[in-house]
Image (cartoon, rainbow, N blue to C red):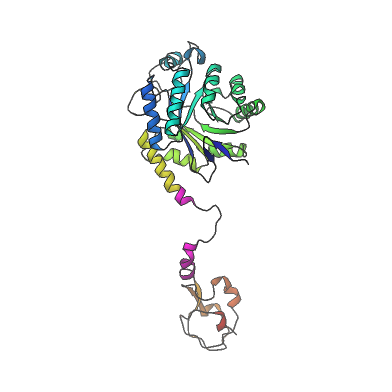
Amino acid sequence: MTPLILGEREISPQHRPYLIAEIGVNHEGSLDQARHLIDLCKEGGADAAKFQTYKASRITSKNSPAYWDTSKEPTESQYKLFQKYDMFGPDEYISLARHCQDIEIDFLSTPFDADAIDFIDPLVSFHKVASADITNIPLLRQIAKKGKPVLLSTGASTLGEIDTARDTLNKAGCSELVLLHCVLNYPCLNRHAHLNMIESLQRAHPDLTIGYSDHTVPDDAMRVLSAAWLKGALVLEKHFTHDKTLSGNDHYHAMDVHDLKRFQENVNILMETLGNTIKKPLEEEAPARLHARRSIVIDRPLKKGHQLVEADLTYKRPAHGISPLHWDEVIGRQINKNLDADNILRWEDLA
Protein backbone atom coordinates (compact mmCIF):
# COMPACT_ATOMS: atom_id res chain seq x y z
CA MET A 1 0.00 0.00 0.00
CA THR A 2 1.08 3.56 -0.69
CA PRO A 3 1.90 5.20 2.65
CA LEU A 4 -0.84 7.53 3.91
CA ILE A 5 0.36 11.06 4.58
CA LEU A 6 -1.60 13.43 6.83
CA GLY A 7 -0.06 16.87 6.94
CA GLU A 8 3.66 16.14 7.13
CA ARG A 9 3.23 12.80 8.91
CA GLU A 10 3.40 9.30 7.50
CA ILE A 11 0.76 7.10 9.09
CA SER A 12 1.78 3.51 9.81
CA PRO A 13 1.98 1.01 12.70
CA GLN A 14 5.71 1.77 12.93
CA HIS A 15 5.09 5.45 13.69
CA ARG A 16 3.51 7.35 16.53
CA PRO A 17 -0.27 7.80 16.28
CA TYR A 18 -1.47 10.92 14.52
CA LEU A 19 -3.32 12.84 17.23
CA ILE A 20 -6.03 15.39 16.52
CA ALA A 21 -6.99 17.69 19.39
CA GLU A 22 -10.52 18.78 18.60
CA ILE A 23 -11.07 22.28 19.91
CA GLY A 24 -14.41 22.25 18.11
CA VAL A 25 -16.25 25.29 19.43
CA ASN A 26 -14.71 25.22 22.92
CA HIS A 27 -13.33 28.68 22.09
CA GLU A 28 -16.95 29.83 22.63
CA GLY A 29 -16.67 32.55 20.01
CA SER A 30 -13.42 34.14 21.17
CA LEU A 31 -10.68 34.33 18.54
CA ASP A 32 -8.07 34.95 21.23
CA GLN A 33 -9.26 31.90 23.14
CA ALA A 34 -9.13 29.86 19.94
CA ARG A 35 -5.49 30.87 19.38
CA HIS A 36 -4.67 30.07 23.00
CA LEU A 37 -6.21 26.61 22.59
CA ILE A 38 -4.11 26.03 19.47
CA ASP A 39 -1.01 26.94 21.48
CA LEU A 40 -2.00 24.44 24.18
CA CYS A 41 -2.54 21.73 21.54
CA LYS A 42 0.97 22.35 20.27
CA GLU A 43 2.41 22.38 23.79
CA GLY A 44 0.80 19.03 24.53
CA GLY A 45 2.21 17.41 21.40
CA ALA A 46 -0.88 17.12 19.19
CA ASP A 47 -0.36 16.82 15.44
CA ALA A 48 -3.44 18.85 14.53
CA ALA A 49 -5.79 21.38 16.07
CA LYS A 50 -9.32 20.93 14.77
CA PHE A 51 -12.38 23.17 14.77
CA GLN A 52 -15.98 22.79 13.61
CA THR A 53 -17.38 25.02 10.89
CA TYR A 54 -21.12 25.49 10.65
CA LYS A 55 -24.02 27.91 10.78
CA ALA A 56 -26.95 26.91 12.96
CA SER A 57 -29.45 27.65 10.21
CA ARG A 58 -27.64 25.31 7.80
CA ILE A 59 -26.97 22.38 10.13
CA THR A 60 -30.29 21.91 11.92
CA SER A 61 -33.94 22.84 11.87
CA LYS A 62 -35.30 24.89 14.74
CA ASN A 63 -37.11 21.81 16.07
CA SER A 64 -34.12 19.46 16.54
CA PRO A 65 -33.99 17.91 20.03
CA ALA A 66 -30.81 17.38 22.04
CA TYR A 67 -29.02 14.02 21.86
CA TRP A 68 -26.41 14.74 24.53
CA ASP A 69 -26.43 14.51 28.34
CA THR A 70 -28.53 17.54 29.29
CA SER A 71 -27.27 17.34 32.87
CA LYS A 72 -23.89 18.37 31.45
CA GLU A 73 -25.10 20.61 28.62
CA PRO A 74 -28.59 21.88 29.54
CA THR A 75 -29.50 23.30 26.12
CA GLU A 76 -32.33 21.10 24.85
CA SER A 77 -32.39 22.37 21.27
CA GLN A 78 -29.66 21.62 18.74
CA TYR A 79 -30.49 24.86 16.95
CA LYS A 80 -30.04 26.95 20.09
CA LEU A 81 -26.77 25.22 21.02
CA PHE A 82 -25.27 25.58 17.54
CA GLN A 83 -26.44 29.19 17.40
CA LYS A 84 -24.32 30.01 20.45
CA TYR A 85 -21.05 29.20 18.70
CA ASP A 86 -21.48 29.85 14.97
CA MET A 87 -20.01 33.36 14.93
CA PHE A 88 -16.74 32.49 13.10
CA GLY A 89 -16.59 33.02 9.33
CA PRO A 90 -13.94 32.63 6.61
CA ASP A 91 -11.76 35.47 7.94
CA GLU A 92 -11.56 33.94 11.42
CA TYR A 93 -10.69 30.49 10.07
CA ILE A 94 -8.04 31.94 7.78
CA SER A 95 -6.52 33.67 10.82
CA LEU A 96 -6.56 30.43 12.84
CA ALA A 97 -5.04 28.46 9.97
CA ARG A 98 -2.21 31.00 9.73
CA HIS A 99 -1.61 30.73 13.47
CA CYS A 100 -1.39 26.94 13.15
CA GLN A 101 1.09 27.35 10.30
CA ASP A 102 3.18 29.78 12.35
CA ILE A 103 3.57 27.34 15.26
CA GLU A 104 3.80 24.24 13.01
CA ILE A 105 0.68 22.30 13.85
CA ASP A 106 -1.83 21.10 11.26
CA PHE A 107 -5.06 23.07 10.97
CA LEU A 108 -8.35 21.20 10.52
CA SER A 109 -12.02 22.03 10.69
CA THR A 110 -14.98 19.74 10.15
CA PRO A 111 -17.34 21.37 7.62
CA PHE A 112 -21.08 20.81 8.03
CA ASP A 113 -22.45 22.48 4.89
CA ALA A 114 -21.55 23.22 1.27
CA ASP A 115 -20.27 26.75 1.89
CA ALA A 116 -18.07 25.58 4.75
CA ILE A 117 -16.52 22.85 2.59
CA ASP A 118 -15.55 25.36 -0.09
CA PHE A 119 -13.94 27.98 2.14
CA ILE A 120 -12.25 25.46 4.48
CA ASP A 121 -10.73 23.40 1.65
CA PRO A 122 -7.81 25.74 0.80
CA LEU A 123 -6.84 25.82 4.48
CA VAL A 124 -6.54 22.06 5.11
CA SER A 125 -4.44 19.21 3.74
CA PHE A 126 -7.20 16.66 4.43
CA HIS A 127 -10.85 16.67 5.44
CA LYS A 128 -12.79 15.29 8.39
CA VAL A 129 -16.41 14.13 8.12
CA ALA A 130 -18.47 13.86 11.30
CA SER A 131 -20.33 10.66 12.20
CA ALA A 132 -23.68 12.35 11.76
CA ASP A 133 -22.89 12.97 8.07
CA ILE A 134 -21.96 9.39 7.14
CA THR A 135 -25.28 9.13 5.27
CA ASN A 136 -25.10 12.66 3.82
CA ILE A 137 -24.46 11.74 0.19
CA PRO A 138 -24.20 15.29 -1.26
CA LEU A 139 -21.78 16.38 1.47
CA LEU A 140 -19.64 13.27 0.97
CA ARG A 141 -19.52 13.84 -2.78
CA GLN A 142 -18.56 17.50 -2.41
CA ILE A 143 -15.73 16.70 0.00
CA ALA A 144 -14.48 13.80 -2.13
CA LYS A 145 -14.25 16.05 -5.19
CA LYS A 146 -11.60 18.12 -3.40
CA GLY A 147 -9.22 15.19 -4.00
CA LYS A 148 -7.75 15.14 -0.50
CA PRO A 149 -7.56 12.37 2.10
CA VAL A 150 -10.75 12.03 4.14
CA LEU A 151 -11.21 10.98 7.76
CA LEU A 152 -14.70 9.54 8.25
CA SER A 153 -16.10 9.00 11.75
CA THR A 154 -18.39 5.97 11.95
CA GLY A 155 -20.36 6.62 15.14
CA ALA A 156 -23.87 5.10 15.27
CA SER A 157 -23.41 3.49 11.84
CA THR A 158 -23.83 0.00 10.45
CA LEU A 159 -21.24 -1.78 8.32
CA GLY A 160 -23.61 -1.36 5.39
CA GLU A 161 -23.78 2.41 5.89
CA ILE A 162 -19.99 2.53 6.09
CA ASP A 163 -19.74 0.58 2.84
CA THR A 164 -22.14 3.00 1.13
CA ALA A 165 -20.21 6.02 2.39
CA ARG A 166 -16.93 4.53 1.24
CA ASP A 167 -18.33 3.73 -2.18
CA THR A 168 -19.77 7.25 -2.49
CA LEU A 169 -16.46 8.87 -1.55
CA ASN A 170 -14.43 6.65 -3.87
CA LYS A 171 -16.68 7.26 -6.88
CA ALA A 172 -16.56 11.02 -6.29
CA GLY A 173 -12.75 11.19 -6.21
CA CYS A 174 -11.54 10.23 -2.72
CA SER A 175 -8.65 7.78 -3.07
CA GLU A 176 -7.36 7.96 0.54
CA LEU A 177 -9.80 7.21 3.34
CA VAL A 178 -9.41 6.70 7.09
CA LEU A 179 -12.28 5.17 9.07
CA LEU A 180 -12.57 6.29 12.68
CA HIS A 181 -14.36 4.06 15.17
CA CYS A 182 -16.58 6.30 17.26
CA VAL A 183 -19.45 6.00 19.72
CA LEU A 184 -21.89 8.86 19.38
CA ASN A 185 -22.55 9.55 23.07
CA TYR A 186 -21.59 12.73 24.89
CA PRO A 187 -19.99 11.68 27.16
CA CYS A 188 -19.38 8.03 26.28
CA LEU A 189 -19.17 5.70 29.28
CA ASN A 190 -16.09 3.47 29.29
CA ARG A 191 -18.26 0.36 29.02
CA HIS A 192 -19.80 1.79 25.86
CA ALA A 193 -16.49 2.59 24.11
CA HIS A 194 -16.29 -0.88 22.49
CA LEU A 195 -12.68 -0.58 21.37
CA ASN A 196 -12.90 -4.09 19.92
CA MET A 197 -14.87 -2.51 17.07
CA ILE A 198 -11.54 -1.10 15.85
CA GLU A 199 -10.59 -4.67 14.96
CA SER A 200 -14.00 -5.19 13.36
CA LEU A 201 -13.37 -2.24 11.04
CA GLN A 202 -9.90 -3.62 10.26
CA ARG A 203 -11.41 -6.95 9.26
CA ALA A 204 -14.11 -5.33 7.14
CA HIS A 205 -11.71 -2.88 5.47
CA PRO A 206 -8.21 -4.43 5.61
CA ASP A 207 -6.90 -2.03 2.95
CA LEU A 208 -7.78 1.10 4.93
CA THR A 209 -6.19 2.92 7.85
CA ILE A 210 -8.37 2.72 10.96
CA GLY A 211 -8.53 5.30 13.74
CA TYR A 212 -10.63 6.26 16.75
CA SER A 213 -12.58 9.35 17.75
CA ASP A 214 -13.00 9.31 21.53
CA HIS A 215 -15.83 10.76 23.62
CA THR A 216 -15.01 9.11 26.97
CA VAL A 217 -14.13 11.21 29.99
CA PRO A 218 -10.32 11.14 30.23
CA ASP A 219 -8.81 9.39 33.23
CA ASP A 220 -5.51 10.43 34.77
CA ALA A 221 -3.54 7.82 32.83
CA MET A 222 -5.31 8.33 29.46
CA ARG A 223 -5.94 4.58 29.31
CA VAL A 224 -8.74 4.58 26.73
CA LEU A 225 -6.86 6.52 24.08
CA SER A 226 -3.71 4.49 24.74
CA ALA A 227 -5.64 1.22 24.46
CA ALA A 228 -7.25 2.35 21.20
CA TRP A 229 -3.80 2.88 19.70
CA LEU A 230 -2.67 -0.55 20.86
CA LYS A 231 -5.82 -1.99 19.27
CA GLY A 232 -4.62 -0.60 15.94
CA ALA A 233 -6.09 2.91 15.75
CA LEU A 234 -3.37 4.90 13.97
CA VAL A 235 -5.28 8.20 13.88
CA LEU A 236 -6.76 9.44 17.15
CA GLU A 237 -9.13 12.31 17.80
CA LYS A 238 -10.34 13.70 21.11
CA HIS A 239 -12.06 16.90 22.20
CA PHE A 240 -9.75 19.46 23.76
CA THR A 241 -10.28 22.26 26.27
CA HIS A 242 -8.27 24.65 28.41
CA ASP A 243 -10.50 23.96 31.43
CA LYS A 244 -12.33 20.67 32.02
CA THR A 245 -14.35 22.15 34.89
CA LEU A 246 -16.30 24.46 32.58
CA SER A 247 -19.94 23.49 32.18
CA GLY A 248 -21.69 22.85 28.93
CA ASN A 249 -20.75 22.16 25.35
CA ASP A 250 -17.75 19.78 24.92
CA HIS A 251 -15.64 20.75 27.95
CA TYR A 252 -16.92 17.97 30.21
CA HIS A 253 -15.56 15.05 28.15
CA ALA A 254 -12.50 16.80 26.70
CA MET A 255 -8.84 16.34 27.47
CA ASP A 256 -6.63 19.26 28.46
CA VAL A 257 -2.95 19.94 27.89
CA HIS A 258 -1.95 17.84 30.91
CA ASP A 259 -3.93 14.85 29.63
CA LEU A 260 -2.35 15.32 26.22
CA LYS A 261 1.14 15.30 27.70
CA ARG A 262 0.35 12.16 29.72
CA PHE A 263 -0.84 10.43 26.58
CA GLN A 264 2.39 11.36 24.79
CA GLU A 265 4.34 9.91 27.73
CA ASN A 266 2.33 6.69 27.35
CA VAL A 267 3.20 6.56 23.67
CA ASN A 268 6.89 7.10 24.44
CA ILE A 269 6.89 4.16 26.85
CA LEU A 270 4.82 1.92 24.60
CA MET A 271 6.86 2.73 21.47
CA GLU A 272 9.96 1.73 23.42
CA THR A 273 8.43 -1.51 24.67
CA LEU A 274 6.58 -2.70 21.54
CA GLY A 275 9.75 -3.50 19.59
CA ASN A 276 10.06 -6.24 16.98
CA THR A 277 7.09 -7.73 15.17
CA ILE A 278 8.89 -11.06 14.55
CA LYS A 279 9.56 -13.36 17.50
CA LYS A 280 13.26 -14.20 17.75
CA PRO A 281 15.97 -14.33 20.45
CA LEU A 282 17.47 -10.95 21.20
CA GLU A 283 21.14 -10.19 21.65
CA GLU A 284 20.30 -9.13 25.21
CA GLU A 285 18.95 -12.64 25.90
CA ALA A 286 22.16 -14.44 24.92
CA PRO A 287 23.46 -14.79 28.52
CA ALA A 288 20.10 -16.21 29.62
CA ARG A 289 20.06 -18.72 26.75
CA LEU A 290 23.51 -19.92 27.78
CA HIS A 291 23.23 -19.88 31.55
CA ALA A 292 19.53 -20.18 32.45
CA ARG A 293 18.57 -23.01 30.10
CA ARG A 294 19.24 -26.64 31.07
CA SER A 295 21.76 -29.30 30.17
CA ILE A 296 21.46 -33.08 30.59
CA VAL A 297 23.30 -33.87 33.84
CA ILE A 298 24.53 -37.19 35.33
CA ASP A 299 22.43 -37.92 38.44
CA ARG A 300 24.60 -40.69 39.99
CA PRO A 301 28.19 -41.96 39.52
CA LEU A 302 28.59 -44.07 36.36
CA LYS A 303 31.37 -46.32 35.03
CA LYS A 304 32.87 -46.22 31.55
CA GLY A 305 30.85 -48.33 29.10
CA HIS A 306 27.57 -47.88 30.99
CA GLN A 307 24.49 -47.69 28.76
CA LEU A 308 22.45 -44.68 29.79
CA VAL A 309 18.87 -45.02 31.07
CA GLU A 310 16.54 -42.24 32.22
CA ALA A 311 17.24 -42.98 35.89
CA ASP A 312 20.90 -42.03 35.31
CA LEU A 313 20.04 -38.52 34.16
CA THR A 314 18.47 -35.25 35.19
CA TYR A 315 18.46 -31.70 33.78
CA LYS A 316 20.07 -28.65 35.36
CA ARG A 317 21.36 -25.22 34.54
CA PRO A 318 23.54 -23.99 32.81
CA ALA A 319 23.11 -24.90 29.12
CA HIS A 320 26.83 -25.70 28.68
CA GLY A 321 26.35 -29.31 27.68
CA ILE A 322 23.85 -31.41 25.75
CA SER A 323 20.42 -29.79 25.67
CA PRO A 324 17.40 -31.75 26.96
CA LEU A 325 16.11 -31.28 23.41
CA HIS A 326 18.30 -34.35 22.68
CA TRP A 327 17.07 -36.39 25.65
CA ASP A 328 15.74 -39.26 23.51
CA GLU A 329 18.97 -39.38 21.47
CA VAL A 330 21.09 -39.74 24.62
CA ILE A 331 19.06 -42.58 26.20
CA GLY A 332 20.65 -45.91 25.25
CA ARG A 333 24.07 -44.44 24.40
CA GLN A 334 27.23 -45.71 26.19
CA ILE A 335 29.59 -43.38 28.00
CA ASN A 336 33.31 -43.54 27.18
CA LYS A 337 34.63 -42.50 30.62
CA ASN A 338 33.74 -42.59 34.28
CA LEU A 339 31.33 -39.77 35.12
CA ASP A 340 30.54 -38.39 38.57
CA ALA A 341 27.14 -37.20 39.77
CA ASP A 342 26.38 -33.58 38.77
CA ASN A 343 28.61 -33.90 35.70
CA ILE A 344 27.22 -31.92 32.75
CA LEU A 345 26.98 -34.38 29.88
CA ARG A 346 28.71 -33.48 26.59
CA TRP A 347 28.70 -35.22 23.24
CA GLU A 348 32.37 -36.12 23.65
CA ASP A 349 31.43 -38.19 26.73
CA LEU A 350 29.45 -40.61 24.55
CA ALA A 351 30.85 -43.64 22.70
- 12 and 332: which one is in front? 12
For image coordinates 45% across by 47% down, the residue present is 270
Quarter of the image with the N terminus is: top right
The magenta span reads 271-292
- Taking the image as shown, residue 43 lies to the left or right of residue 175, namely left
Up/down of 38 relative to 83, above or below: below
Residue 339: x %, y % from top left? 50, 85
| Whether residue 203 is visible | yes
For image coordinates 50% across by 35% down, the residue present is 212
Residue 138: x %, y % from top left? 61, 19
Looking at the image, the residue that sits furthest to the top is 62
Q: Is residue 88 magenta?
A: no
For image coordinates 54% across by 24% down, the residue present is 121
Q: Quadrant of residue 122?
A: top right
- Taking the image as shown, residue 189 lies to the left or right of residue 203, namely left
Residue 85: x %, y % from top left? 41, 17
Q: Quadrant of residue 327?
A: bottom right
- 314 and 121: which one is in front? 121
- 309 and 111: which one is in front? 111
| Whether residue 252 is visible | no
Residue 68: x %, y % from top left? 43, 22
For image coordinates 40% across by 29% down, the residue present is 38
Looking at the image, the residue that sits furthest to the right is 171
